[in-house]
Image (spheres, helix red, strand yellow):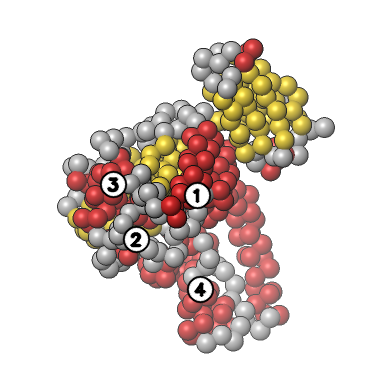
Amino acid sequence: MRIVLFTGKGGVGKTTTAAATAVVAAAAGLRTAVMSTDPAHSLADSFGVELADEMSEVAPNCFAQQLDAQARMESSWSEIRDYLRGLFDWAGLDDIEAEELSVIPGLDEVFALADIKTFDNSGEWDLLVVDCAPTAETIRFLSLPDILGWYMERLFPLGRRVTKVVGPVVSRLAGGVPVAGDAVFGATERFYQRLEGVKGLLTDASRSSVRLVVNPEKMVVAEARRTYTYLSLFGYPVDAVIANRVLPDEIEDPWFSSWKQAQALHLDSIEEGFAPLPILRSELASEEIVGIDRLAAFGERLYDGVDPASVLHEGHPFRMDKADDEVVVSIDLPFARKEELEVSVALGELFITVGPYRRAVMLPDSLRRRSVRGAALADGTLRVRFGHD
């Protein structure tokens, strides 16, 4: 099964692009599923239909789903739900408040990760399209397998032992406060086992890709560059950038002239900042893109003969590795020559100039506190070494 995840700053057209990709892929004969991990779901609005927690067919070969964290809590975590309700009832909350608070923030992402693994194991799907939350939430979503693994391996066994020893004492001293028992811990452990292998699946460049959706605007492009850096840092492959809502050439009204000039500059910065990733462009639509027909037309214009389910770019052009006390940033620069290469760091960015072309790579915070110890170009790859002062 192929997996394509879409993310971007809120309002850039991420959901529309994800839905259109699913519709075009399904029309090509792929059995396609599309799901939303954004708590503020808008996938149903894009298709113009009602969507539930289960997959429902919205077009031939195309099935869609919006996660309902409350429903999943009822079906998947009944032991945890009952424990939380008892805890909130002990705290004096009424039934409605307890019901709402029993849905822990972030559950949508956890359930989505479990669903991705379930879809892959089923063997029923050719393509899974994931409409992710805006960029900051997407980084958290994709880091969840590592975070949950750390807690399960280190703190979970300790917490279980402590609860068995201290729980009865706390319950007596605190007037019957509910204490998590084996049923709660067992439910958590069983659910975590459903997530096993998700990180490996989503970092496999031959099977999974992230696509960044941007508008040609300064703030949007800057956030997308940061997202690209952090996705690369965590090993998640990005195979394309989609520049959405580009003003079409036929708009010649003088009122739009300065806007078009600004977009042209930002499009140049997108080409430069995300090279060598392919940049797909979609023009600003003259009407709202809602419903299967309009999504299909939008998707056909966007991909223009390109298979939306294919890997649009192979490899990791930007990588980070630990070597002793240094961090080595590796960037593929095929055909570059040493005499035409310049490297510098300023204001949290790594600037690489090859001949007349310049690329700026946004550095993660962990590298901004380090200094450059050296740089070398060998076998078409530039390696920049960062170390502590």
Per the model, the C-alpha gap separating discs 4 and 2 is 25 Å
> Element at badge 3?
helix
Q: Which residue is mark 2?
A: 43
Q: Position of residue 44 (x, y in %)?
A: 31, 64
Q: Amino acid at mark 2?
A: Leu
Nearest the viewer among 227 and 299 is: 299
Q: Which residue is mark 4?
A: 102
Q: Amino acid at mark 3?
A: Gly
Chain-order first, disc 3 or disc 2: 2
The answer to which image quadrant residue 233 occupies is top right
Per the model, the C-alpha gap separating discs 3 and 2 is 15 Å
Q: Is residue 266 visible?
A: yes
Q: Which residue is mark 1?
A: 258
In the image, is 57 to the left or to the right of 72? left
Of circles 1 and 3, which is in front?
1
Per the model, the C-alpha gap separating discs 1 and 4 is 51 Å
Give the quadrant of the N terminus.
Answer: top left
Chain-order first, disc 1 or disc 4: 4
Of circles 2 and 1, which is in front?
1
Q: Position of residue 4 (x, y in %)?
A: 37, 43
In the image, is 69 to the left or to the right of 272? left
Nearest the viewer among 367 and 141 is: 367
Please tell me which residue is depicted at 55% across the width and 30% down the height of the picture.
Answer: 318
Per the model, the C-alpha gap separating discs 1 and 3 is 28 Å
Neighbour tally class for label 3: few under 14, some 14-19, many 20 plus, Cα within 10 Å: many
Residue that extends furthest to the front in the rendered view of this protein = 254
Q: Which residue is mark 3?
A: 299
